[in-house]
Amino acid sequence: MAPFPLDLIGLLGKTGTYLIFLAIGFGFGYALEISGFNKSTNLAGQFYFRDARVVKVFFTAIVVAMSLVFLSVSLGWLDYNLIWVPPTYLWPGILGGLIMGVGFILGGFCPGTSVVAAATLKIDGLVFVLGGLVGSWLFSESERFFSNFYFGSYYGRLTLMDVFDISTGTAMLLVTAMALLFFFAMEKLQIFVADKDTPRTHSRQIAWFAPLAASLVVLLSGPPTTAEKWERMAAEKEPLLAKRAVQIHPGELLDNLADDNQPVLMLDVRPEQDYNLFHIRGARHVRMDDLEQTANELLLDPGISQTVIVVMSNDETAATEAWKTLVANGVPNVYILEGGINNWLSIFAVAEDGIQPKVQVGDDQLNYAFSAALGDQWEAADPFPHEWELEYEPKIKLERKRGPSTGGCG
């Protein structure tokens, strides 16, 4: 599944990768330049309703990218969870947008367009870039004084679908409709303020049927199900299960729990009755039917890429299905507790009063009897790591996802 390949450097080498980046950057800069975005008067004109090209170009870019991305997701060509979505910091974002907007009006450029202007040797563009560099330096030197505000009101990876609880297709239709409304309004204002009309062309009108059609396709087809997502990646992921590369020994889980620098999230997918009898301290009970929602919640967690996630059932049957669900939905660093809770108890509850092994009663059943339902109050629920020296093959390897370190309008 795309994006492919994930490792461009491994496929093309550094030189080939940098050439691709250069070509993309050149293409983007060229598109801005031929759109007239190297002239501050054209850019500033949008704020005075004299020139609608900025709204048109950027809204067109948004709608085209949105249509291609989500249509590809709907067709199974693209895994949306592998795409970097900038996290939302609400109030810092609003203040930053206001500051940038004022700078845009005063200087006639945003960061990206100022670079385009500088590349075409526009003096005001060169001065704007210099001012941006000085401002970046001042920000880096003073950020520590307002870091609490700067990193405050964090909402994670937030989309319109999350905010309004609507489907992707509905969000696409709303954004497309909003773009068309903006186009119409800006053109009317442009005629009223500057007496400048936009030529009507059939090709321009026909072109807008494409995003509308893409939105309808996504709306009618809906997002791929977890089963469909797993089917597309099964050839890649099934060998991990067969080679037991993701089933971790209880000793490895215990050592990671004892590491203060390593966040660990344990998801116990057993029936609630078994969970109430006994569970590892800190384990979170999750119903199998709620795993998709849990996956979506985990992906909004800013620390998810540094967190080890361990799913567990009484043996490995339900945990394996839970692993598939989480992996299919893009959750990183997911592992299975080897042998499940039964194996954990066979190691850590051998001499504890009130816990007795019983004859195995069936697949993924709890093979221990308990004198009381104490949950995580049993000694075996929280063994002291330094009292146990267990040999195991380490398998946990964090797959850290990194996003771009910068942003802007272009």
Image (tube, helix red, strand yellow):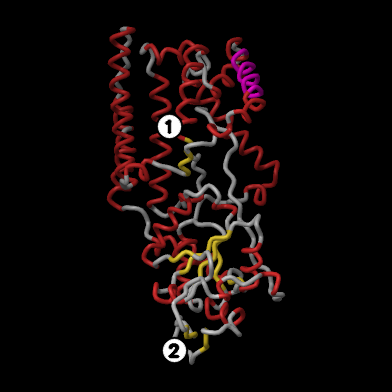
Magenta span of residues = 127-138
In the rendered image, which residue does mark 2 sit on? 361
Check disc 2 and give the amino acid type.
Answer: Val
Q: Position of residue 225 (x, y in %)?
A: 37, 60
Left or right: where 146 falls relative to 219: right
Rendered position, 4 above or below 349: above
Q: Position of residue 239 (x, y in %)?
A: 57, 70
Residue at point 66%, 55% (across, down): 261
Residue 61 — which label?
Answer: 1
Residue at point 27%, 50% (across, down): 220
Mark found first going from the N terminus, 2 or 1: 1
Residue 177 — which label?
Answer: none
Q: Position of residue 336 (x, y in %)?
A: 54, 70
* Mark 1 surroundings within 10 Å by alpha-carbon count, few (fewer than 14), some (14 through 19), many (20 or more): few
Q: Which is more toward the observer, 277 or 390?
A: 277
Residue at point 39%, 29% (across, down): 59
Rendered position, 80 above or below 88: below
Which is closer to the viewer, label 2 or label 1?
2
Q: Is residue 137 magenta?
A: yes
Left or right: where 233 falls relative to 220: right
